[in-house]
Image (cartoon, grey):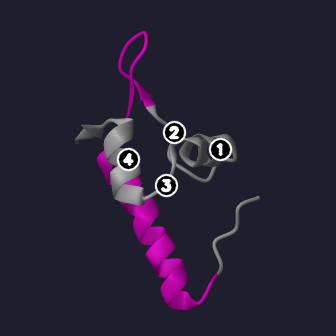
Amino acid sequence: MRIIRLSEVLLFTGLARSTVYRYIEKGIFPKPVSLGDRAVGWVDEEVQAWVMDRVGERDRGEEFKVF
């Protein structure tokens, strides 16, 4: 398992920081893992799975819904 920081999440997903946190609030993006008092990271595999789900929706002709 690999933990990635926000900068890598942003590069990998193409999302903005505010969008990542808004999606987390809405329950549609993986939650971060606390790494200490002021540091969080994301499980790389969870972020990759989230991106692959978006690709799957695209391929099925589904629309990604932000509640």
- Reading the image, the residue beneath label 1 is 22
**Which mark's residue is nearer the viewer, 3 or 2?**
3
At x 46%, y 60%, the residue is 50
In the rendered structure, the answer to whether residue 61 lies left or right of residue 9 reads right
- Kindly check if marks 3 and 4 are in contact, taking CB atoms under 8 A apart as contact: yes
Label 4, on which residue? 9
Question: Would you place residue 56 above or below residue 12 in this image?
Answer: below
Rounded to the nearest whole Å, what is the CA distance between mark 1 and mark 3?
11 Å
Determine which residue is flagged by label 2. Answer: 31
- First reached walking from the N terminus: tag 3 or tag 2: 3
Q: Amino acid at mark 4?
A: Val
**Hey, which residue is sitting farthest left in the picture?**
1
Which amino acid, by three-letter code, is at mark 1? Answer: Arg
Of helix, strand and loop, which one carries label 1? helix
Q: Which residue is mark 3?
A: 15
CA–CA distance between discs 1 and 2? 11 Å
Height in image: 65 above or below 12? below
